Structures are given as structure tokens and as C-alpha cells.
Image: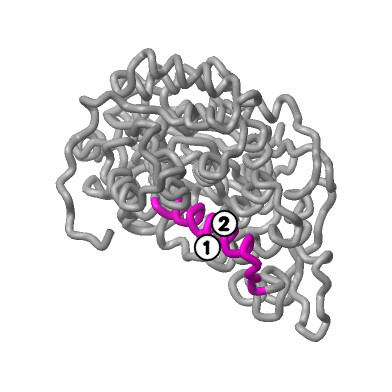
Amino acid sequence: MRNITVKVHPSKANLKKKEQLAWKIAEISSDKAKLNKDAIEMVINRIIDNASVAIASYNRKPVVSARQMALAHPRKNGANVFGLSSKVKVDCEWAAWANGTAVRELDYHDTFLAADYSHPGDNIPAILAVAQQKGCNGLDLIRGILTGYEVQVNLVKGICLHEHKIDHIAHLGPSVAAGLGSLLKLNTETIYQSVQQALHTTISTRQSRKGEISSWKAFAPAHAGKLAVEAVDRCMRGEGAPSPIYEGEDSVIAYVLSGPGKKYIVPLPKVNEPKKAILETYTKEHSAEYQSQALIDLARSLNKKIKNLNNIKKITIETSHHTHYVIGTGANDPQKMDPYASRETLDHSIMYIFAVALEDGAWHHVKSYTPQRARRKSTVQLWRKIVTKENKKWTKKYHNRDPKKKCFGGKVIVKLKNGSTISEEINVADAHPAGKRPFGRKEYINKFKVLTDNIISKKESQRFLKCVQNLRKLKPKDLKGLNVEILPKMRKRIKNSKSIF
């Protein structure tokens, strides 16, 4: 690996292309790096994971809306839409939109947290859609996905967006563009322009994850993927981009992020070095914000130890800066304490999540979020006894650059009415690679079977799992096999809404 220093340069400096971050990203996207065996296996795991959550969200409103929009753009040799017959094809950018929304809707796929946040699995829908439309094979797809993960993970390590209230999809646009460059074997110049265009068009504010969180939280990554597809298409036609997009005098760093005096250090592999960043990412056992995963596991454990939850006077969760200020009481969002809040808001409230997990001793991607569950009197009472507090010890663990030492948990202090306290802490989620029950292929397959049960047939389940595990050998005509078709009885009739498409 190498560390790239990224800073603003005045226009008169005429910064050379080869010294720009976008060019260095393009170089590794167009290189001939060997594929790492473990990384390939993880690509397969993540395609299974994405399919699990996409199918489970098939009939949820944002997913239905995105799918209807995609179906208004049919294409004979296009890409597939998750849940539908592989014979149904649409323009790839619209498949990226529909499938990206389906993957993101339940907040239940993989994550990487460092200087910023990310869900690297958001790269997959767009890259897969283009692969299907352009006749790529399994190995092409693997290369594209590995590049997408590599670029996003390393941008997340080096550049913090959220401190400037910029949404994390600003790292996703460039990573999808880079992944598509690898997939399609584009030259460095074309990828360079594509990365810059994709970044320029995918900058938006974090209001999509603040206050009353709407369905845009699910749409946002899909939109970034769609815009990246369109950016690559334009650059393949010879069009250019605002440049240098990171280092320019009026660029992203200068006026969106920390300003002309700031230096960022972005790690990247050397040219032709195997891309293994996907191995640093981790999926979710529970359908909730990643920073709640370990705390859900801790709540499940405490459920067995506290016999009467009515005896609880107060619960304090000592945790990292990120957890406290994003999903904790440090966010100062009254909606995070509101029983009538949206599902999207509730899955970004560690107070709600911890209360439900503590009461139920379990977590469910549907049952834990129903209006009836959120408004249960005992839950609301417990929920409002919970506060979070930043502890610098946990913030330091959160930012540890050693993946084996990085932690996303916290310490929970339960004060009882009799004056006694119960205190426990957890470093990482049970499903984390360093946790009690790390996810492997068996667990990914089990998650797929659980989430798709009664939604797809057993025959379809077996077919998909056999196909995806043979990813390296798939020919272009076989990539449609990565689509999963749901049972006809699960397809709800949707009334045509008044819309443009």
C-alpha cells in the first residue's frame, strides 16, 4: 500500500494529472492486478448478502417505486431487476437504481467505518447491472466489484465527509465509476474522467440521515450508482470532467470539505497490487445501523440477566463519538425518541434499538420496527431512560487503523432503582470477523434462506446459490442467473400512480 497526500493546489500550479487522486484511482482501476482467492470468496458472500436483503424488501414502498420507474425503461439486451423473471430487462442505469434501492432499504447489508461511513455493498447493483448489459463474464464482475470496494474503503479511511455534513455517497460515486472501469477494461484516461464526473454529481448533504429520516436514505446510494453509470457512459464517448476535482482551487476539498489548508492522506494499493479491501468490511446480523450491531448483541445478553426491566432507573451507553452523535442522544434529534417516527429514523436511534433488543432478547428486521412495537408503553418508558455518552477510549478504538483492533461497541451501565448497577461492555458484534460468531459462507447462506423463505421457491434458492458460488466460471449468458425471481403469489398488484414515467 502507499499513502497519497491530497490537498488543494492553486490553478496557476497546473497540477499534473498523474499527481491527482482521481488519476491514481484510475491507475489501480485499469491495472492487471492478480485476484486474491479470499477476496474472490468474499465477493461471492456479498452478492449472496445483497440478494438476501433485496428480496426481503421486495414489496416495501421505496423498492416498489424504484422498480416501477425502472420498468418504464425496458431494453431488449439490458439488465435484470431483482425479484422479476430474468426475461424482464431494463436499461442498466435504471436496473442499478431499482436494485440499489432494494439492497439499501432494510439497512441490512455490509458496512465499513473509519474516518467516514460506508456500505460498500452499494457498489454491487450498478456494477452487476452494467455487466449484464455489456456481456461481461464472472471474472470481469469480480474485478469490477473488488475495485469498487478498494476505492470506497480507502476513500473512507482517508477523507471524512460527515464532519462537513456531506453524505457518504460522495465516496460511492467515484468507487462505482472506478469499478465500472475495471469491469469494462477501460483505459486510465477514461476512468480518470469518469471518477471526477461521478464525484462532481454525487455530492449531497447529510440531511438525508438527520432529523425525520425519509425513504431517500434508501434511494441515495442507488442514485449515486445510477449517476456513476451515466458518468462512465459520457466519458466513454470522449467527454471530460471538472478537473482536478479533489485538488482544484474551487474543488471539493477547497469549498465542500476542510478548505485549502487541509491535507488528506488516502491509502491506495500500488499499481498491480492485489485488491483486498473487501476483506476489511463486515456485514450485519441485524437490520439496523451498523454501530448498533454490537449493542444489540449486548442487549440480548443483558435480557437474560435482568429479570425485571421495571427495576431499571437509567441506562447509560458509553461509546464512540460517531455512535453518540449519529445514532445517540448526541445527535439532538427529538425524532430519535419519538414512538411515531419513521422506520428509517428508528433504525438510526440506538436508544430505541437497545430498548427493544433488551425487552425482546432478539432483533427482527420487520417485527422490531412495526408501529405497534415502537409504541408499546413499556418500550417507550424504557427507551426514554437511555442516554449515550462519548468516551474517548471508545472513539480511539473506533479509529484504530489496525482492522483487528478497531471496535464499534461500547460500555453499558444499567442503574437499578435499588441503587445497584450492572455494567458490561462489548468491542465488536458477534458476527464481526473478530466477534464470537464470525460470518462465513454458511452464515451468509443461512441469512439468504431466512430472509427469502416463502418469498422464493426452494428450487430457485438452490439454483441461485449454486450459480453464485460458481462465479469465477460464469460466462456472459450466465450472469442473469445472479438475479433471483420471487414466487408469483408474492407479487402484489400495484396501482398505477400519477407520475412522469
Q: Nearer the viewer, residue 74 or 501?
A: 74
Which residue, given by chain and number where applicable, does mark 2 sit on? 173
Relative placement, left or right, of 146 versus 301 is right
**Compared to 13, does 409 lie above or below?**
above
Q: Position of residue 475 (x, y in %)?
A: 60, 28
Snapshot quadrant of residue 501 = bottom left
Name the kind of residue labelled 1 in the image.
Thr
Which numbered marker is on residue 61? Answer: none
Magenta stretch, main secondary structure, is helix
Ranked by sequence position, the earlier of labels 1 and 2 is 2
Specify the segment rendered in magenta: 219-242
Residue at image location 38% in from the left, 13% down from the top:
459
In what element is the residue under mark 2? helix
Q: Is residue 448 magenta?
A: no
Which residue is at the far bottom? Answer: 12
Labelled pair 1, 2 in contact (Cβ < 8 Å): yes
Relative placement, left or right, of 342 versus 107 is left
Task: Characterize the local packing of mark 1: few (<14), some (14-19) or many (20 or more) Cα atoms within 10 angstroms.
Answer: many
